Image (cartoon, rainbow, N blue to C red):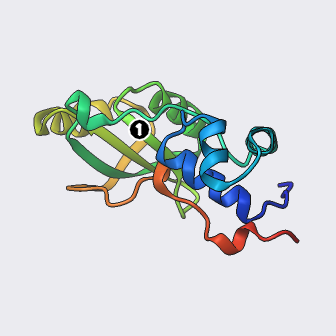
């Protein structure tokens, strides 16, 4: 992975964008005492480097998806790619990652009610050949999500 040097000005710009990704560069520039073109160039540089993505985050709760669960799966190695494709095609799956073990996958799922989660665990996952549910945990409240995470300021010092 190629790493670019970013500084504390970039960090401040990112803090502003995290609050509101639609905030105009001119407004950020005014708040930070910078030139608007400088702010635009720095945002463009971070996007082009792949350090940030400017994207839309949908709040599942707003749409009634109030049930969240983390599910831990064991997958037959010879069916791994097919399982991954099946899980990626499921709208209930909001997160999919390889787990610590060689056959493990971790998924996060969203539902409107407990019955939908129950049906997913009893019928949805077992319908995928090669998947075995190792365990799951209901998530009563997410305290920090990926869209709120940021590296510490010391990661923004020019090298």
Q: Nearer the viewer, residue 44 or 130?
A: 44
Q: Residue furthest bottom?
A: 154
SS state under label 1: strand
Q: Quadrant of the N terminus?
A: bottom right
Q: Nearer the viewer, residue 3 or 83?
A: 3
Q: Residue at x 56, y 33 (%)?
A: 55
Q: Nearer the viewer, residue 150 or 103?
A: 150
Residue 58 as seen in the image, left or right of residue 15? left
Using the rendered view, name the quadrant where residue 37 is placed. Answer: top right
Q: Quadrant of the C terminus?
A: bottom right
Q: Residues within 10 Å of mark 1 (few under 14, many from 20)?
A: some
Q: Residue 16 at x, y = what percent?
A: 56, 50
Residue 150 as seen in the image, left or right of residue 89? right
Q: Is residue 82 above or below residue 143?
A: above
Q: Residue at x 61, y 70 (%)?
A: 152
Q: Residue at x 62, y 45 (%)?
A: 28
Q: Residue 89 at x, y = what percent?
A: 46, 24
Residue beneath disc 1: 94
Residue 56 as seen in the image, left or right of residue 47? left
């Amino acid at each position: 992975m190629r790493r670019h040097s970013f500084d504390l000005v970039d960090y401040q710009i990112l803090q502003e964008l995290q609050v509101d990704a639609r905030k105009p560069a001119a407004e950020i520039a005014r708040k930070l005492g910078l030139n608007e073109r400088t702010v635009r160039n720095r945002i463009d540089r971070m996007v082009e480097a792949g350090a940030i993505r400017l994207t839309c985050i949908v709040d599942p709760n707003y749409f009634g998806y109030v049930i969240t669960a983390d599910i831990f799966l064991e997958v037959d190695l010879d069916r791994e790619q097919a399982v991954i494709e099946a899980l990626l095609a499921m709208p209930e799956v909001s997160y999919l990652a390889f787990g610590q073990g060689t056959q493990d996958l971790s998924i996060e799922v969203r539902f409107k009610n407990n019955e939908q989660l129950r049906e997913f665990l009893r019928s949805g996952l077992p319908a995928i050949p090669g998947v075995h549910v190792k365990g799951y945990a209901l998530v009563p409240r997410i305290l920090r999500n990926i869209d709120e995470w940021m590296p510490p300021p010391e990661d923004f010092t020019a090298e």
